[in-house]
């Protein structure tokens, strides 16, 4: 057989961790389940034998002195696969990255009955003004809560969970399989207790041993000012209570904003459109527009809230003109100021005229020299790519 250190590819003064790391790497490459080639299987046996010796301080010391680490000849009846010191733990580690179920390796242990609950999500529709300025809502929430009858233990009153007789509280049971490598010992969750390590002889009748029951409860949620469509408000510890009466998850309230009859929202800005007659656009006028704050005043008598404001339409205003009214939009979610209100003016051209109106308009057209306008042709606004293309020609 080759030198054991050469088989693992480590120097003779290698530390135990380096030897273990080298063996895991080779085991992943040479294991029969990965590579069934007979020559590879033979090499896997040699590598495993090398690791069995070099991972044991006494056997390694005997090997370094030139003696027989097995005391009866390596590869013989007392050698690999039959020696009392061989463990399959590190082969399991090589493939699963943790402690295997072999001798000397610990398992995962029993899993806890008490676990954190899941998060919950509900959707809440609010008005635009409520989303802008904040509101407090009363919600009805259907979630799991701690069972009052057993206070979360899952056991009927007067009883309690007991240690599992099958796994003796370990939550796992060992299974032994024989292979050409010897006995392979693995750990699996105990079927009798489902890995908990305890059983409940008398489950609570109210929760069937879960430690929690479903219930509808009232909850008050404060929606902060500035939330928008899809914003989620987190309420810590108001979600589902966990199994075994474990701590509750969080409740997320997802905001949906109802359409508004006057305003539309883009970011923190509000947009609205006003229509004015042709004569009003030409001569100028003033309009009274509602404020978004006015939606929060039920009877309109709250003197502290501005429910309307005056908009000036200047003489000669063209259709499509936009006026930006600063700080009349939606407050920022994190007190980052307030957006603007953009008012777009649409000029209405009369569709039907009586004889007198038509006479007056023709007289006006004659005075302005507009009886037979030739039309002013304007170039179409080019896109960004069009302007870039022209710039290089």
Image: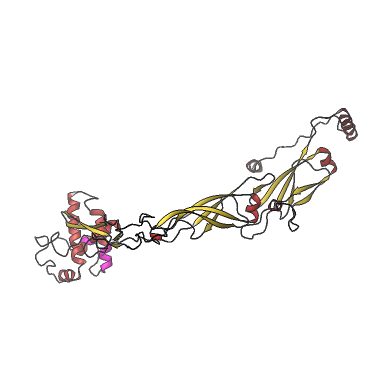
Most extreme residue toward the top is 355
Task: State the residue in front, 79 or 310.
Answer: 310
Q: Tell me if 127 is positioned left or right of 214 in this view.
A: right
- Magenta-colored stretch includes residue 163: no
Tell me how many marks there are: 0
Task: State the residue in front, 26 or 221.
Answer: 221
Whether residue 109 appears in this view of the structure is no
Instruction: Pick the quarter of the image with the C terminus.
Output: top right
Residue 272 position by quadrant: top right
**In this rendering, is residue 53 above or below 376?**
below
Instruction: Pick the quarter of the image with the N terminus.
Output: bottom left
Task: State the residue in front, 363 or 253.
Answer: 253
Q: Tell me if 146 is positioned left or right of 3 in this view.
A: right
Residue 161 position by quadrant: bottom left
- Looking at the picture, how far across and down is residue 52, in whole percent? 19, 63
Residue stretch rendered in magenta on the structure? 7-21
Q: Which residue is at 20% across, 68% downward?
A: 56
Task: State the residue in front, 54 or 348.
Answer: 348
- Magenta-colored stretch includes residue 13: yes
- Looking at the picture, how far across and down is residue 111, in whole percent? 33, 60
Whether residue 219 appears in this view of the structure is yes
- Looking at the picture, how far across and down is residue 73, in whole percent? 9, 64
Q: Tell me if 79 is positioned left or right of 170 in this view.
A: left
- Looking at the picture, how far across and down is residue 309, in whole percent? 77, 51
**In this rendering, is residue 110 above or below 283?**
below
């Amino acid at each position: 057989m080759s030198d054991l250190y050469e088989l693992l590819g480590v120097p003779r003064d290698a530390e135990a961790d380096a030897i273990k790391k080298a063996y895991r790497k080779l085991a992943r490459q040479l294991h029969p389940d990965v590579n069934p080639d007979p020559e590879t299987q033979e090499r896997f046996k040699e590598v495993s034998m090398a690791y069995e010796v070099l991972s044991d301080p006494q056997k390694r010391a005997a090997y370094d002195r030139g003696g027989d680490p097995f005391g009866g000849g390596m590869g013989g009846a007392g050698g690999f696969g039959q020696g009392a010191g061989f463990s399959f733990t590190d082969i399991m580690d090589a493939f699963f990255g943790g402690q295997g179920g072999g001798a000397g390796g610990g398992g995962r242990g029993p899993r806890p009955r008490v676990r954190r609950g899941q998060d919950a999500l509900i959707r809440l529709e609010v008005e635009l003004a409520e989303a802008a300025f904040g509101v407090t809502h009363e919600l009805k929430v259907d979630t799991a809560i701690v069972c009052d009858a057993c206070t979360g233990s899952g056991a009927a009153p007067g009883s309690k969970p007991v240690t599992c007789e099958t796994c003796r509280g370990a939550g796992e049971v060992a299974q032994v399989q024989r292979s050409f490598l010897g006995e392979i010992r693995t750990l699996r969750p105990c079927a009798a207790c489902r890995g908990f390590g305890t059983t409940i002889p008398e489950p609570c009748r109210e929760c069937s041993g879960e430690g929690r029951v479903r219930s509808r409860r009232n909850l008050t949620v404060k929606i902060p000012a500035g939330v928008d469509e899809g914003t989620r408000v987190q309420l810590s510890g108001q979600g589902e209570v966990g199994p075994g009466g474990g701590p509750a998850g969080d409740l997320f309230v997802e905001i949906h904003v109802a359409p508004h009859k006057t305003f539309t929202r883009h970011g923190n800005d509000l947009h609205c459109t006003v229509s004015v007659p042709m004569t009003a656009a030409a001569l100028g006028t003033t309009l009274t527009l509602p404020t978004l704050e006015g939606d929060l005043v039920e009877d309109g008598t709250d003197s502290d809230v501005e429910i309307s404001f005056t908009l000036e339409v200047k003489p000669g205003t063209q259709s499509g003109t936009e006026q930006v009214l600063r700080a009349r939009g939606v407050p920022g979610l994190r007190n980052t100021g307030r957006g603007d209100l953009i008012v777009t003016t649409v000029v209405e051209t009369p569709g039907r005229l009586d004889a007198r109106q038509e006479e007056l308009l023709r007289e006006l057209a004659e005075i302005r020299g507009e009886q037979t306008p030739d039309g002013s042709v304007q170039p179409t606004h080019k896109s960004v790519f069009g302007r870039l293309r022209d710039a290089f020609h």
